[in-house]
Image: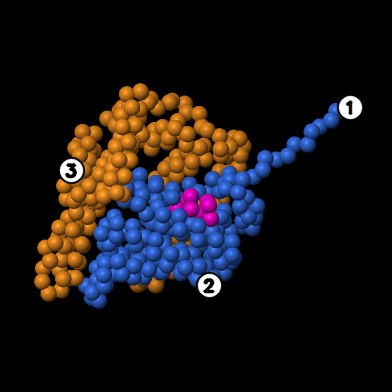
Chain colours: A orange, B blue
Amino acid sequence: MAKLDRWNPLTPLAAALLVVAAAYVGPAPWAPGAALAVSLAAAWWAGLARRVGALAAAVAIPTFALLALTNGVLAAATRWDPSAVQDALDVALRLGAAVAALATVVSGVAPRRLTRALSARGLPGWAAYLLVASLEAAPEARERARQVLDAQRCRGFAPGKGIAGRLRAILPLAGPLVSAMVVESDERALALDARGFRAGRARTALTAVADPAPERFARRIIWLALLAVLFWGLVR
Amino acid sequence: MVCYRTVRPPASRPYAISTLALALIPRAVALNLALGAIVQALKLPVYLDSVGTILVAALAGPLAGALTGVLSNTVLGLLATPVLLAFIPVTVVIGVLAGVFAKLGAFRRAWSAILAGVAIGVAAALTSVPIVIGVYGGLSPTGTGVVTMALRGAFGLSMESAAKVASVATDVIDKPLSCAIVALVLARLPARITARFAKAA
């Protein structure tokens, strides 16, 4: 059992949103720096440090490099502008903190548990269905794309040279994917109708997600802190 | 003698979504991801990550299109890059506009679909610029970010102007192509299926 699964999924989600808000509203570079440190510490505690660190670095480092290069060298034209590097660092720290906080929740909480917790808090049946079905369809998608590509190659398909040739190759690949998607949807809709699915009806979960009173209280405090941070950001 | 009371069907709400559209949306989200994989395999300088959104909008209306856009970015945000969650408003604009253009009949012919794609591309680019500036400081670590950097270096444009020009330039290629693919696929779909969608929408 993952460490974050011991909690109701809404609690780490609320905490992550608070960290993101603090990173963007608080004074840079200290607030985003602290938010990044807290997020990475939480990821380390949850045993997700490597994945979360890699995701945050993959977004923050290229952004820092692009901004520092463009604003510090190219835009300044004649002389090096050190303030541009400070601005680039602020943006990269904020981005890194946001990615690390959200990635910790996303990697540590099973999407089905999150959907069940949201359903228990009043998420309508249609929204729960869409979220779960989309999350389940996503891993199949890349496999399906690979299958279509392999099938067309077996029929002698070869993308032409240059961009125009490769653009022409899109239709033989996208066509079967799109047609299959529409036909499958028709069959899925019939199955939903046959099962008496009603969009507005709440779903009944087989196993309820625990939400003990102390955790609900802690979550209320986090939501209030989030509102306070946002309010401070507006009036500052 | 037995009398039966007339039973009226429940009044349909204007924002209600059909079962057919509900079944289509998750498949369209998967299609957005699958086409992303194909574009990567072909090493093309476009995204084509909105074809599913535009197709749902064309078949099931603007609300279903917007929902598909929201879900695509939510799922990709949950599974791959959380930053994509910030770009949800852009996908809503794409879904709604595609649905409106579909109601005007823009997807009946390839050329009108391409024109609709240009309009959708410009609107999507203008919506994404404030987000790119707020989240990335103007330069996203993608092809668009590199174009922004080049424009800023070559012409000395402000960050906002360079980001706007770069976003419009890339989206004005990507979205018409996506719309043309949707129009071509719609023309080849069996009439039985398109009729079911027309009835449900």
Q: Chain for mark 3?
A: A
Q: Which amino acid does label 3 sit on?
A: Ala
**Magenta stretch: dominant SS?**
helix
Mark 2 closeness class: few <14, some 14–19, many ≥20 residues within 10 Å? some
Question: Left or right of A159: which side holds A69?
Answer: left
Of residue B30 and residue B125, the one placed in the foreground of this image is B125
**Residue B64 is inside the magenta segment:** yes
**Residue B142 is inside the magenta segment:** no
Q: Which mark is residue B111?
A: 2
Check the image and name the residue furthest to the front.
A235
Indicate whether A160 appears above or below B134: below
Q: In terms of image quadrants, where is residue A64?
A: bottom left
Find residue B38 and report its horizontal and vertical position in percent: 39, 58
Q: Which amino acid does label 1 sit on?
A: Met
Residue underneath mark 1: B1
Check the image and name the residue furthest to the bottom.
B155
Verify CB contact (< 8 Å) between mark 1 and mark 2.
no
Q: What residue type is labelled 2?
A: Trp
Of residue A151 and residue A204, the one placed in the foreground of this image is A204
Find residue B49 and report its horizontal and vertical position in percent: 41, 57
Report how far apart the C-alphas of labels 2 and 3 lie in the structure. 53 Å
Q: Which residue is drawn at 46% across and 69% down?
A: B118
Residues drawn in magenta:
B62-69
Give the mark toward the camera: 3 or 1. 3
Q: Residue at x 19, y 66 (%)?
A: A71
Q: Residue B105 carries which label?
A: none
Q: Residue A34 carries which label?
A: 3
Of residue A12 and residue A230, the one placed in the foreground of this image is A230
